[in-house]
Amino acid sequence: MRLTLAGFFIIAAAGILAAQPRAKGSSKTIKLGVPTPGVQIPLQKLKPESELSIEGSPESILVDQSIWISNRSKNALERLDPKANKLVEPVSDLNKPCGNPQFGFGSVWVLNCGDGTLARVDVKAGKISKTVKTGAINVRAGLAVSPDSVWAFTDDKTTLSRMDPAENKIVAEMRLPAGCNSIAYGETSLWITCPAENRVLRIDPSLNIVSQRIETSAEPYAIAVGEGSVWAYCKKDGKVERIDPKTNKVSKTIELAVPNAEADITAGEGSVWVTMPGFPITRIDPKTDKVIQQFVGEGGGFVKTAQGAVWLTNVKQSTVWHLDPRRIAATLAE
């Protein structure tokens, strides 16, 4: 494991710009991405504040006082001290950590797909304090925290389980449509993507019921809450749906022009951020509902915003970037 200053990275980066991606299932090179002049920018032009190399398979990121990065191949949760800008002792003894780690109730919560458990990590000690037999499935984002509970997808029948963190036990269960795959909490509700239904479900945690079923574009795949809205990435056509939590309706559809891409989405620091193969960072302005930057190149996989920064996991490169959103905004195509 090592930390490489951004200045050294940029020298090497000049050789990694990817060729224009191909549409999935096509042998022809098709121009992907938003065609508006000035939007597409070579990734090599972007300078991260730092690059963290992690041995293994870094995946989803969680940001609180520390930066936590799941590392399935090492059965660990890596921990980065953002002030010292270095890795500290990881949380080991996990079993194929999967999905998206979450913070709440003084703990970090991690699903283990290897043995179907939910691990509770004491953030001060940096060690597992409790392991609960809940069940777990390998979905994009199968874990969320509300003000009084921890929520998780716990079996392949898409059961959503509610756990009381005071008792460390499941207190309620809901059966959802098959294939629902991402969950987020915000605006007093849980929001869940259901690709087979072409819907986002809104769940009222005070009643443990689905309160709204919101029609979206095809295959809603990833979801985020922030910047005053709910944002659902829809995989089939490469679109982001903006959902107004007051009306429970899609208020805007934003074209990314990259169909059938596995992607992650987050909202914060004044923008909505999407990462997908060939386009590690796509930035949407929530004031105009338009894609204003789309970086083209190798990298990406998972993205989060917090502490005035954007954190990007480059899964294939086994690296994590720390990016200043102001520097991103100032990086131009020409």
Image (cartoon, rainbow, N blue to C red):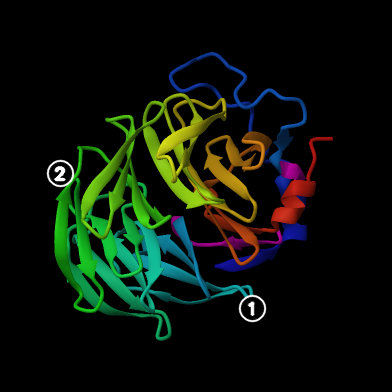
Residue 48 vs 107, above or below: the answer is above
- The foreground one among 246 and 236 is 246
Q: Which residue is mark 1?
A: 84
Q: Residue furthest top?
A: 28
Q: Is residue 236 above or below residue 65?
A: above
Image location (x, y in percent) of residue 261: 46, 32
Q: Is residue 129 found left or right of 90 in the rendered image?
A: left
At 61% from the left and 27% from the top, the residue drawn is 33
The answer to whether residue 188 is above or below residue 105 is above
In the image, is residue 48 part of the stretch drawn in magenta?
Answer: yes
The local secondary structure at tag 2 comes to loop
**Residue 260 in sight here:** yes
User: Left of 185 or right of it: where is 79?
Assistant: right
Question: Tag on residue 253?
Answer: none
Q: Earlier in the sequence, mark 1 or mark 2?
A: 1
Mark 1–mark 2 Cα distance, whole angstroms, equals 43 Å
| Percent x, y of residue 311 | 58, 57
Q: Nearer the viewer, mark 1 or mark 2?
A: 2
Q: Residue furthest front?
A: 247
Question: Three-letter amino acid code at disc 2?
Answer: Lys
Near-viewer residue (78 or 209) = 209
**Residue 93, percent across and down?**
30, 73
User: Looking at the rendering, in which quadrant would you find the N terminus?
Assistant: bottom right
- Point out the stretch of residues depicted in magenta: 44-58
54 left or right of 161 in image: right
Observer able to see residue 95: no
- The amino acid pointed to by label 1 is Ala
Q: Circle 2: is it few (<14), some (14-19), or many (20+) Cα within 10 Å?
A: some
Residue 197: x %, y % from top left: 27, 30
Q: Residue at x 48, y 72 (%)?
A: 79
In the displayed structure, 182 sits above or below 304; it is: above
Rendered image: mark on residue 157: 2
